[in-house]
Image: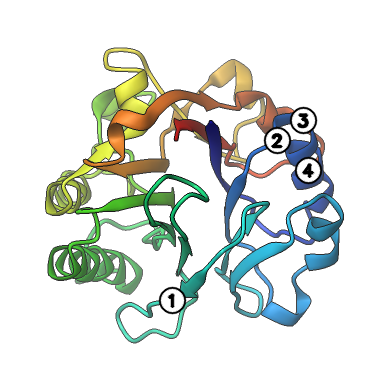
Amino acid sequence: MTKRIATWNINSVRLRLPLVERFLKEHNPDVLCLQEIKCRQAEFPSSAFTALGYSHIALNGQKGYHGVATVSRLPIADMSTREFCEKGDARHIAATFAPGILQRDETVLHNFYIPAGGDIPDRELNEKFAHKLDFLDELTAWTMSHNLARENAILAGDLNIAPLETDVWSHKALLKIVSHTPVEVERMKRLIEAGPWVDAMRTMVPEPERLYTWWSYRAANWELANKGRRLDHIWLSQRLAPSLKSMTILKDARGWDRPSDHVPVIVDLED
């Protein structure tokens, strides 16, 4: 049986709840990972999700900033969070699915919102960029020490890095722009190798085809300019990778009413 997993940086779940409801009704994922929910746990609109059949909710909220949530039609056996860099930010939640629920074996779904890193790609001049690099280093070490990708594991979310030349509209123009600088790309390469993780999106759509999941609000006509970046990712453990059936980037969602600047990414996995 096919299971559908999606990830979406919603940029305020309460503000864009109608968009999330539309997405759930039209695309019917079994599990949806949301980032930048921008609300505390008690403020999360759980009843709206429950009404649509997503009654299993793993939350790590924060007032006004960050925050991740995993909503599911499938029962979640356990959930946990990790704080990175002792910042107190809500940027991670792991949902564990018992054997036979998401896959035949127990499966852990990690939902991440990695720091954006500010505007200046220099750790000495920009504390936010330094935090991003430190976060990636800590995540890489944690991945290796806990063997996160050795069993059935999925890592999904807004990772705020476009690692390949074809993940941005112009490699040359963005080499000194945060999200595509060589130091960030190298950090992501180390993180993938630490799993090792399998990039589900590029498994289904290899280079040289361009893939974008984010288009800036600053563009007067985002679709015509098409200056996108692939900041959102879904990675699979080696053991889970053979179950990958399909992948979709829902570009149309960028044109919905009052949209997020990110769009959903969907993968279908065979059980």
User: Pointer 3: what residue?
Assistant: 26
Of labels 4 and 1, the one closer to you: 1
Say left or right for 180 vs 93. Answer: left
Mark 1 and mark 2 lie on one chain; the one further toward the N terminus is: 2
- Dot 3 falls on a residue whose secondary structure is helix
- Mark 1 is surrounded, within 10 Å at the Cα level, by few (under 14), some (14 to 19) or many (20 or more) other residues, namely some
Q: Which mark is residue 81?
A: 1
As measured in the structure, the alpha-carbon distance from the residue carrying label 2 to the one carrying label 4 is 13 Å
Mark 1 and mark 3 lie on one chain; the one further toward the N terminus is: 3
Which residue is depicted at the point 66% across and 29% down? 220
Q: Amino acid at mark 4?
A: Leu
- Mark 4 is surrounded, within 10 Å at the Cα level, by few (under 14), some (14 to 19) or many (20 or more) other residues, namely some
Task: Find out whether the residues at labels 3 and 4 contact each other: C-beta distance under 8 Å.
Answer: no
Task: Find out whether the residues at labels 3 and 2 contact each other: C-beta distance under 8 Å.
Answer: yes
Mark 3 and mark 4 lie on one chain; the one further toward the N terminus is: 4
Q: Amino acid at mark 2?
A: Asn
User: Pointer 2: what residue?
Assistant: 28
Q: Amino acid at mark 1?
A: Thr
- Dot 1 falls on a residue whose secondary structure is loop
- Mark 2 is surrounded, within 10 Å at the Cα level, by few (under 14), some (14 to 19) or many (20 or more) other residues, namely some
Quadrant of residue 168 in the image?
Answer: top left
As measured in the structure, the alpha-carbon distance from the residue carrying label 4 to the one carrying label 1 is 26 Å
Task: Find out whether the residues at labels 1 and 2 contact each other: C-beta distance under 8 Å.
Answer: no
